[in-house]
Amino acid sequence: MHIFPPEFVYVYGLTNTLFIVVIYVPIYYVAHRKGYELMTTLNPFQANEVEAWQKQQGTWEDFLKLKITLVETIRVSFFLLAPFIGSVLSALFE
């Protein structure tokens, strides 16, 4: 006997996933953009010292965590999809 039909569980998980995405994506975009603005303010381009500028640019990108690796992208994707994945798994293992 089911308390809720499986479709309701899927919709609930999908709704929570969309809620997280709607909150996370704009905040991430603004924080990432502000990080690059801060980096360019703190390390303006210097045409006569390109190598030193590039090294400093890389240091700021690492410090502000502006470089995104594939592993970090996958980790965030699982975080965003966790409610929906949980609802699908709960329906599969009943």
Image (cartoon, grey):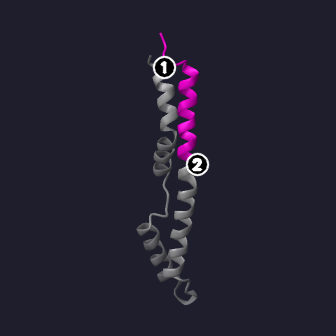
- Quarter of the image holding residue 11? top right
Q: Residue at x 55, y 43 (%)?
A: 19
Alpha carbon distance from label 1 to label 2: 27 Å
Q: Which residue is situated farthest in the bottom direction here?
A: 48
Picture coordinates of residue 68, whole percent (x, y): 50, 57
Q: Tell me the amino acid under the disc marked 1.
A: Leu
Q: Which residue is situated farthest in the left direction here?
A: 63
Badge 1 element = helix
Q: Which residue is situated farthest in the front direction here?
A: 3
Picture coordinates of residue 18, whole percent (x, y): 58, 41
Picture coordinates of residue 75, whole percent (x, y): 46, 46
Does 63 sit above or below residue 92?
A: below
What residue is shown with label 2?
22
Does 50 sit above or below residue 59?
A: below
**Range of magenta residues:** 1-21
Q: Residue at x 45, y 73 (%)?
A: 60
What residue is shown with label 1?
92
What main secondary structure does the magenta stretch of the protein show? helix
How crowded is the residue under tag 2: few (<14 C-alpha within 10 Å), some, or many (20+)? few
Return the mark for residue 18: none
Q: Tell me the amino acid under the disc marked 2.
A: Val
